[in-house]
Image (cartoon, rainbow, N blue to C red):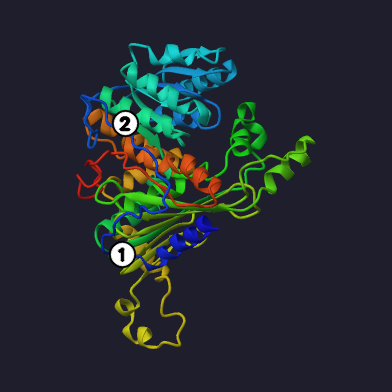
């Protein structure tokens, strides 16, 4: 009962956050250990590596996400796809057919053995290893690739446990190799424009953000190799796929660039949808399914701000990432309606004075929304790049922007847009929400993965 009352008190505190700095709550918060930084290591904030004019890329995993990435990379200047690896031979062959389609030479092929990927990370003619396998193999592949002297880009989520997260951080710091999580949603056009607006003060001070992954996966469950994704949901409780919703919000809030996440509290429903799906499609009775249908997680930051992240992959709801930013001067929203709301008094003072007019706080007109989108287009993109991205595709073009920026920064020796600490912060919800839920929704500490450097940088700034 004490834990439940404490959790309710913590949740209530989210409603009273202000812009003033607050001290992290310690009483009743379950601690999460932060291992000391090994001797000789330094943080990798704004890490730069030697420019690579022609980036030689090896792909590990060409099942669902990999083929699209191969096709996108084939259309970026200064990229050579030199190796393709998958357990299944036919997938590797199809990926090479994509390269031929775009007039590129065939890549070296690796397949047939679940450990054959280790040969790929050891290749001397590879600069970047692009990992798009099942989640449970992401971290170990990334660690070995960095130890073998390669930069790594890892599909989401890049790590499932705190041990994996710290191993990726330590390896990146030790090797001075880039370790970027392939979080494509931060490159969607609305998110990029909203980030630009937030950074230029249009929204005032951003005090609350929301994000989600709400996507009925019934058409896809049986397509995952060895049923790996369903097994993760069956065996684990919590938000097992948080990064799409969390990434854009953390960027707008300058997480580990002037603010940090302090602790979280999670609440979930019982499991109904996925056990029913297994019963209906496979005839199996599942009584020990861990993950609830809907998980909600509240996060409190050092600067007194709040974040709400939700996960639901079974309910009959329209796809939604529920991206929202609430600022002191403005509001941004995507899913189900895309729009901006600004201080009512700044738009029409007479409307703002009428307390009975419920339209006083409303989205700006479609014309003004388009004007804002054009005026505050983020500086890392331009009209030509956006047009190319939409033609190439990949979730409407954001996948192409992600790959283009990765290659651009490597070619020019610039810091990447996302670092290993972003990876850690966005993935840590997976194990920490499970810990909260297994302790009656108790608050759980979120570590400072920079180990003391969270306010070393004043804000998020992409390399130009």
Q: Which mark is residue 407?
A: 2
Q: Is residue 364 above or below residue 156?
A: below
Which residue is found at the position 35% from the left and 50% from the top?
A: 262
Q: CA distance from mark 1 to mark 2?
A: 31 Å
User: Mark 1 or 2 closer to N-term?
Assistant: 1
Q: Would you say residue 310 is visible in this rendering?
A: yes
Q: Is residue 198 above or below residue 112?
A: below
Residue 304 left/right relative to 109: left
| The disc label shown at residue 132, or none | none
* 10 Å crowding of disc 2: few (<14), some (14-19), many (20+): many
From the viewer's side, name the closer residue of 102 and 83: 83
SS state under label 2: helix
Give the quarter of the figure containing the N terminus: bottom right
User: In this orientation, which residue lies closer to the viewer: 181 or 14?
Assistant: 14
Q: Residue at x 48, y 43 (%)?
A: 395
User: Residue 371, how many percent across, how many down?
Assistant: 33, 64
Under circle 1, the secondary element is: loop
Residue 286 versus residue 389: which sits nearer the camera? 286
Q: Residue at x 44, y 38 (%)?
A: 392
Cβ–Cβ below 8 Å for labels 1 and 2? no
Residue 290 sits in quarter: top right
Residue that label 1 marks: 203
Looking at the image, is 331 positioned above or below residue 361?
A: above
Residue 287 percent coordinates (x, y): 73, 41
**Residue in the image at 23% along x and 37% along y:** 45
- Taking the image as shown, residue 131 lies to the left or right of residue 352, namely right
Q: Quadrant of residue 129?
A: top left
Residue 215 picture location, percent across and down: 58, 48
User: In which quadrant of the rendered image does the C terminus lie?
Assistant: top left
Instruction: From the image, state whether disc 1 or disc 2 is nearer to you.
Output: 1
């Amino acid at each position: 009962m004490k834990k439940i009352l404490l959790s309710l008190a913590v949740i209530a505190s989210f409603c009273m956050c202000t812009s003033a700095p607050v001290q992290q709550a310690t009483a009743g918060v379950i601690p999460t250990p932060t291992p000391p930084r090994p001797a000789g290591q330094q943080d990798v904030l704004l890490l730069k590596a030697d420019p690579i004019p022609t980036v030689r890329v090896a792909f590990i995993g060409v099942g669902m996400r990999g083929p699209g990435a191969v096709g996108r990379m084939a259309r970026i200047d200064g990229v050579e796809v030199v190796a393709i690896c998958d357990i299944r031979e036919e997938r590797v062959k199809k990926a090479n057919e994509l390269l031929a389609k775009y007039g590129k030479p065939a890549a070296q092929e690796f397949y047939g053995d679940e450990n054959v990927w280790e040969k790929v990370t050891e290749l001397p003619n590879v600069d970047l290893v692009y990992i798009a396998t099942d989640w449970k193999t992401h971290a170990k592949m990334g660690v070995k690739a960095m130890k073998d002297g390669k930069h790594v880009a890892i599909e989401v989520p890049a790590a499932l446990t705190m041990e994996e997260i710290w191993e990726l951080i330590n390896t990146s710091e030790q090797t001075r190799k880039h370790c970027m999580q392939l979080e494509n949603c931060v490159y969607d056009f609305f998110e990029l424009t909203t980030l630009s607006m937030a950074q230029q003060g249009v929204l005032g001070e951003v005090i609350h953000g929301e994000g989600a992954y709400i996507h009925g996966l019934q058409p896809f469950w049986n397509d995952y190799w060895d049923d790996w994704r369903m097994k993760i949901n069956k065996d684990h409780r919590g938000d097992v796929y948080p990064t799409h919703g969390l990434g854009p919000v953390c960027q707008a809030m300058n997480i580990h660039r002037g603010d940090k996440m302090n602790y979280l509290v999670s609440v979930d429903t019982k499991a109904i949808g996925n056990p029913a799906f297994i019963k209906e499609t496979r005839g199996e009775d599942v009584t020990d399914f861990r993950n609830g249908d809907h998980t909600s997680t509240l996060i409190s930051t050092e600067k007194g701000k709040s974040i709400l992240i939700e996960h639901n992959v079974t309910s009959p709801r329209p796809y939604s990432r529920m991206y929202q930013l609430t600022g002191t001067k403005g509001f941004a929203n995507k899913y189900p309606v895309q729009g901006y709301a600004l201080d009512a008094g700044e738009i029409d003072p007479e409307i703002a004075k009428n307390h009975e007019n419920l339209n006083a706080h409303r989205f700006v007109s479609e014309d003004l929304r388009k004007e804002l989108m054009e005026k505050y287009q983020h500086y890392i993109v331009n009209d030509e790049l956006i047009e190319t991205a939409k033609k190439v595709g990949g979730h409407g073009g954001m996948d192409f922007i992600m790959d283009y920026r990765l290659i651009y920064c490597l070619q020019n020796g610039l810091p990447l847009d996302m670092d290993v600490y972003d990876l850690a912060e966005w993935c840590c919800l997976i194990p920490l929400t499970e810990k909260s839920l297994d302790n009656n929704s108790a608050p759980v500490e979120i570590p400072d993965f920079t180990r003391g450097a969270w306010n070393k940088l004043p804000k998020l700034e992409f390399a130009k």
